């Protein structure tokens, strides 16, 4: 069977593209490695319209139910190859099946970015983790480090601070960049301490588990430490090497490596776009590896569209609301490509062919 459209990736962008593809009566299937994408990692979504607070798992379930009610087809699989042949795309999944379509929407999101420092591979899952909020790791009463300074790092620190004895945010910048709602939470937790202008250079352990990290101040300035819970937390001060139980004996302001003793390290530095599949087809990406599209979310390769976190499209906001918007628009554009006509308005019940 040849589908009109295959959507690769079952995160918010891909799932929304399917709901709209159903509205447009396109014969389509979503192929995704797992349902929900990064939604599965988000325990408390506070900024998705219509839900004051919802877990990523529940939001996924709701979207999947809606997709199925609209008649969308969904399969779990990891796409390993896309071939282009006479205007058709052949898609092969790891599990062996092959699918054919006239158009593709790539909605493969991003993968967790690695630090690429010594010890990271050895201690992954032995104290090094890439999502503090995903599962209940054993961090009760432990000293935890979070690398990063944007939303996911800030959120992770808040989450960990509920059970951990101490949480260090290790950030190469001078100021945390999370949403105000999370920054306020950070300030309310005195066991969170931010170490600015600092990078992790090595993860060390006893062979079984992580015991600490080596950190180094950046050229941007001396490492500056700020305990949370006081008014100064948003404007870091110069480091005071006195009185830190967990730091090695050298001053943080020293340009040499320092040892920070930790039980767990959570690396929360964002993601890299999942574009490897379409690079061999000649799809253009920006210097960061994100897919370049036009305003219709069409790539430079006819029939290939992209939506969600992996699209550069100016300054994409890596959020669910943005991903669902791009997913909807990509389906409309795929319709226009396939039918040679503008996508119809899809208001009211008449849009649905059950
Ligand atoms: C911890 C955390 C908390 C967050 N909290 C919030 C929040 O509160 N509010 C908010 O708005 N946003 C939040 N986000 C961001 C939000 O989840 C993302 O912006 C959104 O999920 C992006 O959607 P997407 O569909 O583009 O990509 P993704 O959600 O990344 O989904 C892409 C999917 O494609 C799959 N895929 C990749 N390659 C292949 C392949 N070859 N074959 C098949 N499938 C493939 C991936 O496995 C993944 O399931 C959070 C993210 C994280 C990590």
Image (cartoon, rainbow, N blue to C red):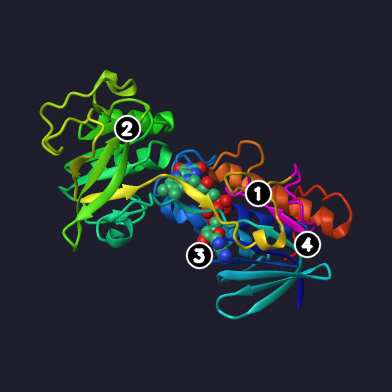
Mainly helix, strand or loop, the magenta region? Answer: loop
In the image, which is nearer the foreground, mark 4 or mark 1? 1
Question: What separation in Å lies between label 4 and label 3 (alpha carbons)?
Answer: 24 Å
Residue highlighted by disc 2 = 185
Q: Which badge, 1 or 3, is on the more N-terminal residue? A: 3
Question: What separation in Å lies between label 2 and label 1 (alpha carbons)?
Answer: 37 Å
Depicted 121 relative to depicted 330: above or below: below
Q: Are marks 4 and 3 in contact (CB under 8 Å)?
A: no
- In depth, the one of 299 and 59 nearer the eye is 299
Question: What separation in Å lies between label 2 and label 4 (alpha carbons)?
Answer: 45 Å
Q: Which badge, 3 or 2, is on the more N-terminal residue? A: 3
Which disc is residue 126 wearing?
A: none
Furthest residue in direction right, as rendered: 340
Q: Which badge, 2 or 4, is on the more N-terminal residue? A: 4
From the top left corner, tell me how far across and down residue 6 is, in percent. 69, 65
Q: Is residue 313 left or right of residue 259?
A: right
Depicted 331 relative to depicted 224: above or below: below
Q: Which residues are magenta?
A: 294-311
From the top left corner, tell me how far across and down residue 3 is, in percent. 75, 70
Residue 302 within the segment the image draws in magenta: yes
Residue highlighted by disc 3 = 34
Residue highlighted by disc 1 = 285
Q: Are marks 4 and 1 in contact (CB under 8 Å)?
A: no
In the image, which is nearer the foreground, mark 1 or mark 3? 1
Q: Which badge, 4 or 1, is on the more N-terminal residue? A: 4
Question: What separation in Å lies between label 1 and label 3 (alpha carbons)?
Answer: 25 Å
Residue highlighted by disc 4 = 25
- In depth, the one of 298 and 217 nearer the eye is 217
At 76% from the left and 47% from the top, the residue drawn is 347
């Amino acid at each position: 069977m040849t589908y009109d459209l295959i959507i690769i990736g079952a995160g918010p962008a891909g799932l929304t593209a399917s709901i709209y593809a159903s509205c447009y009566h396109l014969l389509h299937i979503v192929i995704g490695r797992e349902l929900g994408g990064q939604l599965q990692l988000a325990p408390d979504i506070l900024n998705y319209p219509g839900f004051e607070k919802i877990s990523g798992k529940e939001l996924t379930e709701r979207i999947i139910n809606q997709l199925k009610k609209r008649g969308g087809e969904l399969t779990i699989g990891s796409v390993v190859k896309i071939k282009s042949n006479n205007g058709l795309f052949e898609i092969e999944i790891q599990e062996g099946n092959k699918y054919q379509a006239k158009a593709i929407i790539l909605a493969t999101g991003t993968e967790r970015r690695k630090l690429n420092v010594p010890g990271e591979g050895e201690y992954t899952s032995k104290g090094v983790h890439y999502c503090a909020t995903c599962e209940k790791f054993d961090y009760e009463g432990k000293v935890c480090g979070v690398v990063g300074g944007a939303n996911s790092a800030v959120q992770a620190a808040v989450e960990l601070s509920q059970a951990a004895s101490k949480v260090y945010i290790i950030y190469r910048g001078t100021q945390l960049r999370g949403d105000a709602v999370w920054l306020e939470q950070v300030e309310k937790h005195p066991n969170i301490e931010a170490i600015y202008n600092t990078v992790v250079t090595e993860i060390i352990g006893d062979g079984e588990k992580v015991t600490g990290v080596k950190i180094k101040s950046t050229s941007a300035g001396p490492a500056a430490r700020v305990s949370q819970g006081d008014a100064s937390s948003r404007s870091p001060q110069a480091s005071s090497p006195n009185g830190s139980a967990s730091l090695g004996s050298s001053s943080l302001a020293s340009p040499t490596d320092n040892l920070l003793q930790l039980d767990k390290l959570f690396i929360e530095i964002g993601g890299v776009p999942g574009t490897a599949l379409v690079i061999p087809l000649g799809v253009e990406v920006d210097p960061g590896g994100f897919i370049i599209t036009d305003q219709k979310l069409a790539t430079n390769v006819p029939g290939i569209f992209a939506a969600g976190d992996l699209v550069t499209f100016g300054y994409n906001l890596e959020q669910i609301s943005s991903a669902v918007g791009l997913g909807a628009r990509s389906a409309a554009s795929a319709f226009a490509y396939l039918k040679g006509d503008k996508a119809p308005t899809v208001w009211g019940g008449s849009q649905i062919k059950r």
